[in-house]
Image (spheres, rainbow, N blue to C red):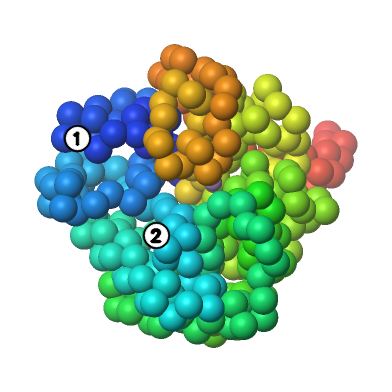
């Protein structure tokens, strides 16, 4: 059975104890095995309490984030890069302290639409800075999973192939790709082929629809995606990510351009998403078996 996760913003963008508790309980009740939190500030959140609740419920946890403009490690301003490096270090520490192993999201550049192309210098600065963070993350047992996002959200890693080149440049063994079907649907020549091509460097997967609402109600070819995940033997987490104006995070909702109310009942949405992913993966597995079965006549 596949490991299926859910982004906490399906439930709440808040980080009070009550909101976090409800997020964990609802995820657990509906059968999700992992909860992904956007970066939580340890000054505002009781991390030890949260880690113990995650453990008690038998859940796993991932943390995602996008670097802010003032912490862009591809910047040519040294103080901005240093700030970004410190932000990444803090995020690695949060993952470790929550009992997780995966930091995900836009870690190599700032999150948001850029007004100019990335320079080679910016690429190199990002690679060398992230390599240092990866080194320290290794000691914490944390992997860095670089989310490949569409052109309107970063000017750096828009395709899995670019991500593979970046990982190679870092020379690090704990840096992987974080693939997201919503972004891949915009940028990749073929989503299934891109997954197959990147197979051994995929560390984390987001499943999201083209409009970020209910799975199967947009234009993403999920059958091809589930086929590819089965073909590469993916047995790690796939996490459902969805946004609606029902749940607003003032930062992320603006950067990801969430203007429409695609759902209100988040329990119905999450239930549907989990069932859709389970059935999709199971169907892909049966298809893979069927194409290999000769079904010869029985001897009698
Ligand atoms: Mn995503």
The residue drawn where x is 39% and y is 59% is 102
Q: Which badge, 1 or 2, is on the more N-terminal residue?
A: 1
Q: Nearer the viewer, residue 211 or 289?
A: 211
Does mark 1's beta carbon lie closer than 8 Å to ligand 1?
no
Q: Which residue is mark 1?
A: 16
Q: Position of residue 140 (x, y in %)?
A: 28, 72
Q: Which residue is mark 2?
A: 102
Q: Position of residue 149 (x, y in %)?
A: 62, 53
Q: Position of residue 61 (x, y in %)?
A: 33, 49
| Residue 251 versus residue 136 in the image, above or below | above
SS for callout 2: strand
Task: Give the CA separation, mark 1 to mark 2.
Answer: 23 Å
Q: Nearer the viewer, residue 40 or 163?
A: 40
The residue mark sitting in front, 1 or 2, is 1
The residue drawn where x is 48% and y is 77% is 77
Q: Quadrant of the C terminus?
A: top right
Q: Are marks 1 and 2 in contact (CB under 8 Å)?
A: no
């Amino acid at each position: 059975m596949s490991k299926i996760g859910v982004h906490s913003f399906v439930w709440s963008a808040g980080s009070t104890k009550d909101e976090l508790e409800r997020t964990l309980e609802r995820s657990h009740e509906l059968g999700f095995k992992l909860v992904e939190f956007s970066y939580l500030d340890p000054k505002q959140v009781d991390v030890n309490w949260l880690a113990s609740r995650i453990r008690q419920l038998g859940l796993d946890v991932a943390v995602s984030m996008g670097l802010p403009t003032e912490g862009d490690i591809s910047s040519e301003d040294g103080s901005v890069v240093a700030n970004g490096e410190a932000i990444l270090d803090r995020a690695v520490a949060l993952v470790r302290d929550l009992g997780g192993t995966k930091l995900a999201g836009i870690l190599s550049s700032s999150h948001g639409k850029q007004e100019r192309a990335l320079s080679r210098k910016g690429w190199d600065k990002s690679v060398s800075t992230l390599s240092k963070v990866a080194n320290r993350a290794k000691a914490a047992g944390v992997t860095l999973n670089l989310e490949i996002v569409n052109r309107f959200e970063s000017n750096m890693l828009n395709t899995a192939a670019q991500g593979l080149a970046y990982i190679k440049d870092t020379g690090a063994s704990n840096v992987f790709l974080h693939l997201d079907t919503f972004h891949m649907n915009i940028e990749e020549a073929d989503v299934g082929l891109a997954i197959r091509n990147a197979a051994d460097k995929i560390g984390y997967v987001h499943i999201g629809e083209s409009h970020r609402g209910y799975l199967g109600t947009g234009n993403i070819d999920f059958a091809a995606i589930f086929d590819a995940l089965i073909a590469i033997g993916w047995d790690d987490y796939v996490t459902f990510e969805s946004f609606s104006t029902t749940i607003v995070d003032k930062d992320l909702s603006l950067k990801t351009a969430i203007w429409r109310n695609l759902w209100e009942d988040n329990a119905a949405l999450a239930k549907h998403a989990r069932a859709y992913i389970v059935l999709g993966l199971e169907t892909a597995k049966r298809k893979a078996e069927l194409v290999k079965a000769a079904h010869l006549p029985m001897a009698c």
